[in-house]
Image: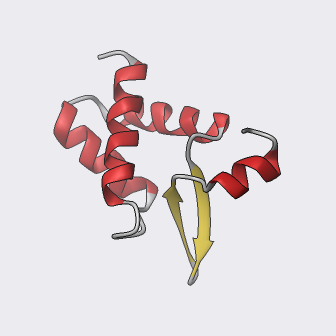
Amino acid sequence: MEQSEIQEKIFAYMEQMKGKKKLKEKDVIKKIVADTEEDKDTVKKALRAMIDVGKLMYSYGGGASSVEIPSEEYLKEKGLL
């Protein structure tokens, strides 16, 4: 499976869970590995690539980090939109 296909699955899952639950990086990786049967490192690289380009972002709250889809305000602030 191509990295772009994995990224599409990651983004679809993130959109599905938006507003329902804060997802940790490992939660996203486990779900996509289970769905696609790709190896963990491949999924992790695809996820990190999405974070690097600003399609996803890390957030911190309550002493834990999570991964989420950035808001439009955040993207404008960072000059990514």
| Residue at 77% in and 48% down | 76
Q: Is residue 25 left or right of residue 35?
A: right
Q: Quadrant of the N terminus?
A: top left
Of all residues, the one furthest to the top in this rendering is 2
Image coordinates for residue 11, horizontal then vertical, percent: 40, 41
Number of marks: 0
| Residue at 26% in and 28% down | 38
| Residue at 65% in and 34% down | 53
Picture colour scheme? secondary structure
Q: Quadrant of the C terminus?
A: top right
Instruction: Examine the rendered structure and indicate whether residue 74 appears above or below residue 20.
Output: above
Image coordinates for residue 71, horizontal then vertical, percent: 61, 56
Q: Is residue 68 left or right of residue 14?
A: right
Instruction: Examine the rendered structure and indicate whether residue 41 appears above or below residue 77.
Output: above
Image coordinates for residue 35, horizontal then vertical, percent: 18, 38
| Residue at 33% in and 59% down | 17
- Residue nearest the observer in this picture, 44 or 9: 9
Image coordinates for residue 52, horizontal then vertical, percent: 65, 37
Q: Quadrant of residue 34?
A: top left
Q: Is residue 74 left or right of residue 34?
A: right
